[in-house]
Amino acid sequence: MTRTRILLVDDEPGVRLGMKGYLTQHGFDVDEATSVAEAQEGFRSHRPDVAVIDYRLPDGTAMELLPRLKEIDAAVPLVVLTGHGSIELAVQAVKEGAEQFLTKPVELAVLKVVLERLVAQRRERQRHAADRSRTERSRVDPFLGTSAAIQALRGQAERIRDADSPVLVTGETGSGKSVLARWLHEGGPRKEAPFVDLNCAALSKDLLDSELFGHEKGAFTSAVAAKQGLLEVADRGTLFLDEIGDMDVAVQPKLLKVLEEQRFRRLGDVKDRRVDVRLVAATHQDLSLAAREKRFRSDLYFRISTLILHVPALRERAEDVPVLARHFLAEMGGARGRGQVALEPDAEKALMAYGWPGNIRELRNVLERAVLLSGASRLSRGDLRFEAAPPDEPLGDDLTLEELERRHIERVMARESGHVERAATKLGISRSSLYAKLKGWQSRNS
């Protein structure tokens, strides 16, 4: 367990020596300061768990220092020590932000107990804040923002929320498809029943089969006991299948039967089981193209695409970036027991100007990295670290049409990390056409 860090602010060397020695022996790490100026700098750089401050300092008093420290981090408890205690002074200190007011000479054993209690209270507040943050995160509003694109999505989602028909949520990776799926469940008539999610891209055909439909004992070599599938777990609730475009073709007819007949069969079983679920599926792929190219069953595509909700990419709603950023920063500050973390104007401009290939997920990562590494209450442009991306080269006016096409395709392939299917979707051509072009260029260069 990490040791508690104390900032001790006193201009008397003997007092500091005695307190530091005692507290260090009892498991505290102690940093020292001798003035208001040093205390502010030490508070900002060391981030103590508690600060112990003498009332009179060479360049001011604790009453001047308390509000400045609270401005840096309001969550850190402050203890004021004074050789001339009075009720009026104690009341003033509490008004200025002190959690405790002790009269010198203070008994070190008493000080130790006070510090331990304040640290325990702070950590309990942090735990509660983290719990609230997790709860709020699971209920995050998928429509944060004021852009026309996100408000149009809200209108469409509200109209279909109470329906029982399958919903297909489309959009780029990291754009918030799973958040929208949970919102549909929690705001709909099935909200009291389970919400069960499964990422189809993360499982092989056999594992997906077993996870989704379950199996009987002895259905395969390692099936030593019967297992309930996620379909049964989601009965009367919502089944969310993320990245359904990556579902193995052999599993797709079984899912179609569930949607059409509300029946399925466990692996190794001989009887059907009835189930009542609403399906919400999500994909970053163009499933209509996949169906035309026989990579996804057309009958399943038509069945799951009764209702389609498209989540816009973050670059298509740049005016929403500051709203989302403020939401995430408030959440992160609460989870760490810190005060509000704000954005400087230059940081906000940088966030709006960036292209966000990773969408909302990338925005959250960039902000979390900045909060963790900077420790500041206001983030500037220098605190933000975006994913490195090669700058676009000017194509030039002296290139042939074939060379222009080739360079554009190479650029898209680089952005999609060599993923042919995603690149083909971005280019608006079939995967087979893209393969043919790549193979043709390769053969000419070999």
Image (spheres, rainbow, N blue to C red):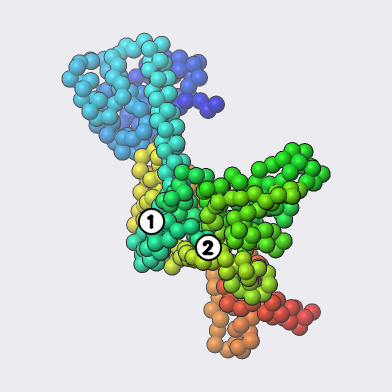
The type of residue carrying mark 1 is Leu
Q: Residues within 10 Å of mark 1 (few under 14, many from 20)?
A: some
Taking the spot 62% from the left edge, 69% from the top edge, the residue there is 299
Question: Does residue 163 sit above or below 403 in this rendering?
Answer: above
Q: Is residue 373 left or right of residue 61?
A: right
Amino acid of disc 2: Leu
Give left or right: position of 441 versus 424. right
Q: Is residue 352 left or right of residue 82?
A: right
Residue bearing the label numbered 2: 168
Q: Above or below — where is 101 with respect to 349?
A: above
* 400 w.r.t. 64: above or below: below
Q: Which mark is residue 51?
A: none
Task: Determine the residue located farthest toward the front in the rendered image.
Answer: 271
Q: Earlier in the sequence, mark 2 or mark 1?
A: 1
- The percent coordinates of residue 132 (x first, y second) are 42, 38
Q: Which residue is mark 1?
A: 144
User: Is residue 8 in view?
Assistant: no
Q: Residue at x 59, y 72 (%)?
A: 288
Asked whether the beta carbons under mark 2 and mark 1 sit within 8 Å of each other, the answer is no
Coordinates of residue 320 in the picture (x, y in percent)? 38, 60
